[in-house]
Amino acid sequence: MRTIRLALVIAISLAGVHAASAQGGLTPAQRDAILGYSLTLDRANHLIAAMSAVSQYLVSQPDYQERLARSAKLTAAEQAAQMEKDPKVSAILKENGLTARDYLIGVPTLRMALLSAQGLASPTIVASPANVAFAKANLAQLKPKMDQADGLGRRK
């Protein structure tokens, strides 16, 4: 179950860029949105909290695998609309002061900034210098939280 949850969390967190990545890279609009998204400690904490709550909720649904498969085929705008239509997801986002767009852009932005801060480089990892600097400065605090949200920090 932990492996399924981790896969779901990663897929959900990259939902906004999934379709473009499958086609060989980010669209210019997705790349610009990620590069233009400014991370702060407060925003990062809200993104991680929302990511954890959204994943827990989705995994609890009997049709989560079908939902994941359907979501992967949607555009970012369609995914945002789908999130806004789901009362539970919408409530989680609102509780964390996020919009669906904030979530769909913010989670991949945070994840890629943390990966870059750890020295991982890849053509698919896009992060602004400011967000990488932020992630480096806050890596000790944010990485364990992100690992926990991904299900990596939990004991069996």
Image (spheres, helix red, strand yellow):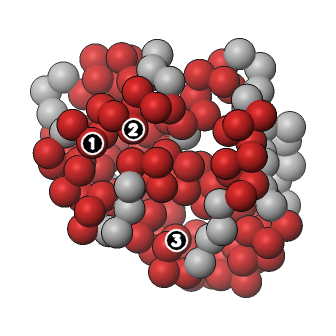
- On the image, the x and y values in percent for residue 3 come to 41, 38
Q: What residue sits 67% from the left and 48% below the top?
A: 33
Q: Secondary structure at mark 3?
A: helix
In terms of depth relative to the viewer, which is nearer, 34 or 61? Answer: 34
Answer left or right for 89 relative to 97.
Answer: left
Residue that carries the numbered disc 3 in the rendered image: 44
| Occupied quadrant, residue 124 | top right
Q: What residue sits 14% from the left and 45% below the top?
A: 87
Q: Quadrant of the C terminus?
A: bottom left
- Is residue 150 in view from this perspective? no
> Which kind of residue does numbered mark 2 sit on?
Ala
Q: CA distance from mark 3 to mark 2?
A: 19 Å
Q: CA distance from mark 1 to mark 2?
A: 6 Å
- Label pair 1/2, CB-CB below 8 angstroms: yes
Q: N-terminal of the two: label 3 or label 1? A: 3
| Occupied quadrant, residue 36 | bottom right
Residue 5 vertical placement versus 23 (above, below)? below
Q: Which numbered marker is on residue 80?
A: 2
> Which kind of residue does numbered mark 3 sit on?
Ala
How many numbered marks, from 0 up?
A: 3
Q: What residue sits 31% from the left and 47% below the top?
A: 55
Q: Secondary structure at mark 2?
A: helix
- On the image, the x and y values in percent for residue 44 come to 52, 71
Answer left or right for 127 relative to 82.
Answer: right
In terms of depth relative to the viewer, which is nearer, 154 or 52? Answer: 52
